Image: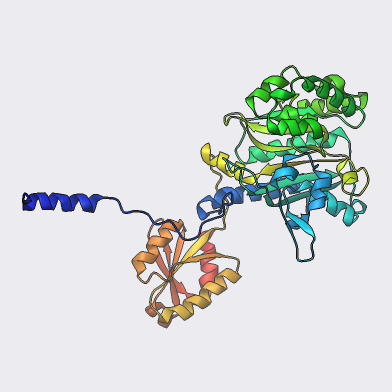
């Protein structure tokens, strides 16, 4: 057996050292389809939140919040048993009292349930409300789509005038513009009403009857339960078949035709371009008349917002027919799109100061002064765990604060604080008792 020389041994050792270490996965991770909102995305999330509140105020919408848990029957009645959400996507379970409940998959049906339960029509007509919160759907996770996601929604309940359809569309467009998203296409359609839809449904069934063998498994179910959803299928074979299918625009009643015409006139009046889309039906049974989506032009059909009219939902969930229209925006989709397109909206924060504490004797005094500054409505940052002055000033630089307030043992004895301008490095000593007014003066 040949003896290896020292150079060969050293070379072998070097190779071993250069081999990458195997990464150990964390013991616990998010459940599939769920996700964390991380500090790095804070500005975009806050921007959506701030703009949502701004638009709600400008358009006179009031906050409504419904529970995350709702009765499963609410969505079966409201959304429809033939929809993908009810058939395949709801997180449902039994409570200890044997009540079947679900994690809410969407926000409109709960809002209508609340409207009926609490007689909200007495307070305002129409009632204009907005909601923001998490929804849950058990679907295949993909870009911009999670099993737990956030929606910002606007609902106008108690009014059937086309004015409110157009206003809802304009609100959604302006929401996106405020975020810096302008490259969108408005796709719009009508799905008719109880008068004209049954006749159109018959025409659809007749057309697809001879094509059933070519339909995908989902569309075979839709043919029996909800044939209008055949137009919404994303499978290539099904998309080819719908090209010669009858479209509802040719079968509208006079009332629906007039409603759609007025919506489009109002949209045009505001200079909005749109694309009529006869295949747009949305995925929920409660829609009637106007349906629309806002699609990102440069992201292969990425829908950023969608909604429509739902005059029959109140009746479906145990009330009466209540005209209503709404829109929802997927917040995760907005964040991902903004990140992809490098759209950055800086969330506005109060001007802050960084409080530097050197040495244990200064902690008690510093703690009291920080509390006083915050009580005076001032944003204060600190990194007291970092012991050295250099490390804390480095943290202040990273935070981007204009001023650093420095307190050490000498300052405690003299009852003073050093104010440092982080842009120029100029320092000034002031009395601790005047720290609030002196700091505010320099921040202004």
Residue at position x 52%, y 38% in the image: 340
Residue 258 higher or lower than 138, as above or below: above
Image coordinates for residue 121, horizontal then vertical, percent: 91, 51
11 vs 275, nearest the viewer: 11
Note whether residue 280 is visible: no
| In the image: residue 219, left or right of residue 407 | right
119 vs 15, nearest the viewer: 15
Image coordinates for residue 322, horizontal then vertical, percent: 90, 43
Residue at position x 7%, y 53% in the image: 6
Image coordinates for residue 310, horizontal then vertical, percent: 84, 39
Residue 110 higher or lower than 294, as above or below: below
Q: Which colour scheme is used?
A: rainbow
Image coordinates for residue 34, horizontal then vertical, percent: 59, 51
Residue at position x 57%, y 65% in the image: 378
Give the quarter of the figure containing the C terminus: bottom right
Where on the picture, by quarter, is residue 418? Answer: bottom left
Residue 54 higher or lower than 231, as above or below: below
Residue at position x 39%, y 63% in the image: 393
| In the image: residue 55, left or right of residue 418 | right
């Amino acid at each position: 057996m040949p003896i290896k020389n020292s150079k060969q041994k050293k070379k072998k050792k070097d190779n071993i050292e250069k081999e990458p270490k195997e990464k150990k996965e964390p013991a616990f991770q998010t459940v599939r389809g769920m996700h964390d909102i991380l500090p790095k995305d804070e500005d975009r999330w806050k921007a959506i939140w701030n703009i949502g509140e701004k638009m709600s105020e400008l358009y006179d919408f009031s906050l409504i919040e419904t529970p995350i848990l709702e009765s499963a029957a609410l969505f079966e009645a409201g959304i429809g048993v033939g929809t993908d959400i009810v058939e395949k996507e709801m997180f449902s379970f039994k409570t200890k009292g044997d009540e079947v409940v679900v994690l809410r998959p969407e926000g409109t049906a709960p809002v209508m349930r609340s409207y009926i339960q609490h007689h909200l029509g007495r307070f305002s007509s129409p009632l204009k409300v907005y909601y923001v919160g998490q929804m849950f759907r058990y679907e295949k996770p993909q870009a911009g789509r999670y099993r737990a996601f956030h929606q910002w929604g606007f609902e106008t309940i108690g009014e059937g005038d086309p004015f409110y359809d157009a206003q809802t569309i304009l609100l959604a467009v302006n929401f996106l513009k405020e975020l810096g998203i302008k490259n969108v296409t408005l796709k719009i359609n009508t799905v008719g009403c109880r008068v004209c839809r049954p006749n159109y449904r018959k025409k659809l069934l007749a057309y697809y009857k001879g094509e059933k063998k070519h339909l995908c498994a989902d569309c075979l179910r839709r043919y029996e339960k909800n044939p209008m959803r055949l137009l919404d299928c994303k499978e290539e074979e099904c998309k080819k078949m719908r090209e010669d299918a009858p479209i509802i625009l040719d079968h509208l009643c006079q009332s629906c035709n007039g409603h759609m015409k007025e919506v489009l006139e109002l949209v045009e009046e505001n200079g909005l371009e749109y694309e009529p889309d006869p295949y747009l039906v949305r995925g929920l049974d409660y829609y009637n008349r106007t349906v629309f989506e806002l699609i990102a032009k440069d992201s292969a059909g990425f829908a950023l917002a969608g909604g429509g009219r739902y005059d029959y939902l109140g009746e479906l969930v145990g009330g009466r027919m209540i005209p209503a229209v709404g829109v929802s925006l997927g917040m995760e989709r907005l964040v991902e799109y903004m990140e992809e397109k490098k759209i950055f909206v800086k969330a506005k924060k109060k001007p802050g100061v960084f409080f530097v504490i050197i040495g244990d004797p200064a902690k008690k005094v510093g703690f009291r002064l920080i509390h006083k500054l915050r009580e005076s409505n001032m944003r204060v940052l600190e990194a007291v765990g970092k012991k050295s002055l250099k490390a804390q000033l480095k943290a202040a630089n990273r935070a981007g604060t204009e001023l650093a307030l420095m307190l050490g043992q000498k300052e405690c004895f003299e009852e003073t604080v050093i104010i440092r301008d982080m842009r120029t490095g100029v320092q000034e000593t002031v009395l601790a008792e005047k720290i609030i007014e002196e700091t505010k003066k320099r921040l202004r």
